[in-house]
Every structure is written in C-alpha cells, then in structure tokens.
Image (tube, rainbow, N blue to C red):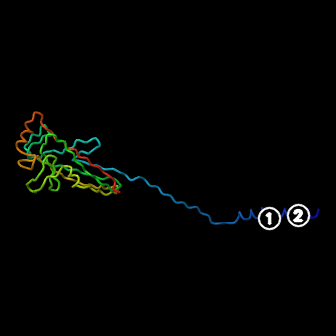
Amino acid sequence: MKTNLIARLGFLALVLTLITTSLVSGTFAKYTKEVKGTDTVRAAKFEFDVKQGSTTFDTTGAAIDIFGIAADGGVTTSPAGIIAPGTTGDFDIEITNKSEVDVNAVLTFSETNSDNIPIYYVYNTQRYSSVLTGLYTGDNNGTYEALTELANDMSSVTLEATDGITPTTQLINLDWFWAFNSAGTGQSDTLDTAIGMAGTLPEVTLDITCTVTQVD
C-alpha cells in the first residue's frame, strides 16, 4: 500500500509539473513579425494609327486620297477622281505608334490597272511601276523597278514604344505621275490616246496595306 501511494504521489507530481511548465512557458515575452512580398503586372497596350491626310486606315479598306492632282494639273475637278497624261500628285502616309511596345510597320502596295495606264510612283528618287519598264531620263536617270519592289526598298519602319504621353510618329511621302512623252517602255502618245478614247474609260486602283508588328 505504501509503495502504491508513493507511486501515485510521484505520478501526480509529474503531471502537475508538466501543467505548470506549460502555463509558465506561455507567459514569456518574445518578438514576432510576419512579412510578405507581392507583385502585379498588366499587359502592355498595343495601339496604332495609320493615316493618309485626315483619313485613318481600317481593316475594311478606307477610301483614302492617293490620286489627288497638283493644283496646276489642267484637269477638271468635277467630277473628282480623274487623271490624264502628265498629271502628278503626292500623298503622305503617317504611322503613329501609341503602343507601350516597340513596333515595326511594313507597307505593301498592290495596283489594279488592267488597261495599263502608265502610272509610276517615286520614292527617294527611284521610280516604280506595274506598267513601265526600262530606262527613264529626267531629274534622275535610272531603270524602273516593279511596284512590288517599293515595299522592299522602304524596308520596315521601326517606331519606339510610347511613354503614355507622346506617341512616336513616322511620315512617309510618295509621288505619283502619269508618264508624259517618252518615259520608258509601256508609254507613248498613241497608247495614251487610246486610253482616253476608250468606250469605257479605264481606271487604276492602288491598295496600300500596313502591317504593324511588335518588335521581338
């Protein structure tokens, strides 16, 4: 009996010691602090304008003014949209990058000219035509290049990302001419006269496409 009593007392003392230790340890003061890190990003804006005059290019093919005639063209302006041998004009294409990324803008040109109106375009003194070939003389002598080469010679236009305040802009100027007198193979007074006296007067259409791509 005495032994059991002593064992029970010893067990009870152990339990009380553990309980007391737990209670005491929970009352000690200590430093503690929780810290975190986080980050949020958003997608960069991709936005641009391509304009000719006050008209903005769109995905359907905006009606722009390419073949406006210089003031001394000597051709009626009513109705509009008429050209003749010797007429000339120019047009600007303005590319504006409103994106928060650098972009490349590539222009391509496609002409519908089934009756071979002898039009040529000039960029940096070089002449390009879908009709005229061979040598030409004038302010700058040279050889006609195909209209498809115009985009290659322009290369791509690189525009830097905007800071959100000032967009970056590039202006490209092109001149056009209906060749007058001898201007290379594909033009003559006889051919010009036949065009002007046709029962259904021929037309020429120039399509300009601008593809804008983020720079890698």
10 vs 117, nearest the viewer = 117
200 vs 84, nearest the viewer = 200
Between label 1 and label 2, give the one nearer the viewer: 2
Q: How many marks?
A: 2
In the current view of this chain or complex, which residue is farthest to the top? 199
Residue 66 vertical placement versus 199 (above, below) = below
Element at label 2: helix
Residue 116 vertical placement versus 20 (above, below) = above
Q: CA distance from mark 1 to mark 2?
A: 15 Å
- Circle 2 residues within 10 Å: few <14, some 14–19, many ≥20: few
Which residue does the image show at 23% across and 52% down from the upper left? Answer: 151
Q: Earlier in the sequence, mark 1 or mark 2?
A: 2
The three-letter amino acid code for the residue at tag 2 is Ala
Q: Position of residue 17 (x, y in %)?
A: 80, 64
Which residue does the image show at 82% across and 64% down from the upper left? Answer: 14
Q: Position of residue 70 (x, y in %)?
A: 11, 47
Q: Is residue 19 left or right of residue 46?
A: right
Which residue does the image show at 32% across and 55% down from the upper left? Answer: 103
Residue 124 vertical placement versus 30 (above, below) = above
The three-letter amino acid code for the residue at tag 1 is Thr
In the current view of this chain or complex, which residue is farthest to the right? 1
Which residue does the image show at 26% across and 42% down from the upper left? Answer: 61
Element at label 1: helix
- Circle 1 residues within 10 Å: few <14, some 14–19, many ≥20: few
Q: Which residue is mark 1?
A: 17
Q: Which residue is mark 2?
A: 7
The quarter of the rendered structure image containing the N terminus is bottom right
Q: Position of residue 69 (x, y in %)?
A: 12, 45
3 vs 129, nearest the viewer = 129
Q: Is residue 108 left or right of residue 34?
A: left
